[in-house]
Image (spheres, coloured by chain):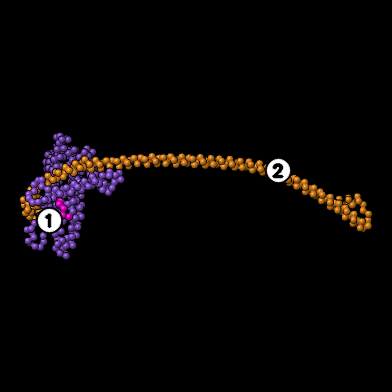
Chain colours: A orange, B purple
Amino acid sequence: MADTPVETGAEAGGAGMPQLDFSTFPNQIFWLVVTLVVIYLILSRVALPRIGAVLAERQGTITNDIAAAEELKQRAIEAEAAYDKALADARSEAGKIVAQAKADIQSELDVQMAKADAEIAAQTAESEKAIADIQAGATDAVKAVAKDTAKEIIAAFGGKADAKAVTAAVTARMKG
Amino acid sequence: MADEAHSEGGGLEFHPLDQFEVHRMFGEGPIHWYTVTNVTMWMAIAVVCIVLLLVIGTRKRAVVPSRTQSVAETLYGFVYTMVEDVTGKDGIKYFPYIFTLFIFILFSNFLGLLPMAFTTTSHIAVTAILAFAVFFTVTILGFVKNGAAFLGLFWVSSAPLALRPILAVIEIISYFVRPVSHSIRLAGNLMAGHAVLKVFAGFAQVGLVVAPIAILGVVAIYALEVLVSAIQAYVFTILTCVYLKDALHPSH
């Protein structure tokens, strides 16, 4: 840079480069030392301890948070296991209840069925009896009608109806 | 501060080094060691910006940080990790000193990129003080911590015996060159970049053909300088850590 000739006529040293003007050195050195001391005092008293504390605090917070998260995760896993267990218990309990209910219903059903069967059987027997009576009544009625009719027919032909013979004949017919 | 002698020639005017001039902020007269100059002003601005970022920006001490606090924490973490990785656990107690250096250089570099700004770290007087402060601190610390064993830094015990004296000479020379390279690297990078910016800016007044190219050049160099500002602050700091490591653990 020194090849560009610039005169600093105002300066006492008269050197080409202001950097080599020794008359300003004491001034620069004095103010540099003042500046460095001021910066050092500010940094070492205020800024650096503060920043260091903030960084340490952050590190601590992060570590704590990670530990807390780890613990919460553990608890979540435990809670899930407990939930699964409760669910399985509830399932087996429900299965038991269902089986119990089924058995109860089945036995109740069996009793009712038996009762119903008995009733039905009773009613069937009664009905059969009634039907038998009716049938018997009907046979007798038919027999009487047939006898009467036969007597009348015989009388109409001018014969004398032999009551015994007619009855025997009608009975024989009706069996056939 | 602009030099009137150049304006007589007409045509192009380049004053790429005017930006580095130290001048009084108030009144006329010679610059004494206590005079308030533009150096004072720009260093004060750096201090204010550092306070804004690292003190005001972190005043809420939020566990979930705001943007400013996040930046402050990132810088803290960046330098802390660097010190821990390079110098080891026992270097942590020097962290505030190293962070002071880093934050001062970083802010001076970036503030210097503002238009019309004065770059305090482009002056060899400033960087040399920084570098020599590191050099003397580290050297004294090395002897205090290790006694005469600190000289083992120059005696490469893993090398063949015949080579060791030669290596010792080379090691000693390289050791004493450290503060020079340490300071000139920083000041040189910044000064060169800013001077080149000014040269491109000077070409921007030439005409319709050259001006757009010059302006593009300014933009490109500016982008490069943003990078250089951060990288030089980083380089200065990590070299400080490396020197500190040598003082704490001098064995190779």
Q: Circle 1: is it few (<14), some (14-19), or many (20+) Cα within 10 Å?
A: many
Residue ID at (85%, 51%): A143
Front-lying residue, B208 or B180: B208
Residue A134 can be seen in this image: yes
Q: Circle 2: is it few (<14), some (14-19), or many (20+) Cα within 10 Å?
A: few
Which quadrant: the C terminus of chain B? Answer: top left
Which quadrant: the N terminus of chain B? Answer: bottom left
Q: Which mark is residue B16?
A: 1
Q: At which x and y percent is residue A38?
A: 17, 43
Outermost residue on the top side: it is B147
Q: Is the magenta stretch mostly helix, strand or loop?
A: loop
- Give the magenta-colored segment's residue range: B115-120
Magenta stretch contains residue B196: no
Q: At which x and y percent is residue B155?
A: 14, 38
Residue B85 can be seen in this image: no
Residue ID at (18%, 51%): B111
Front-lying residue, B70 or B128: B70
User: Tag 2, which secondary structure?
Assistant: helix
The three-letter code of the residue at mark 1 reads: Pro
Q: Name the residue under label 2.
A: A118
For disc 2, the chain is A
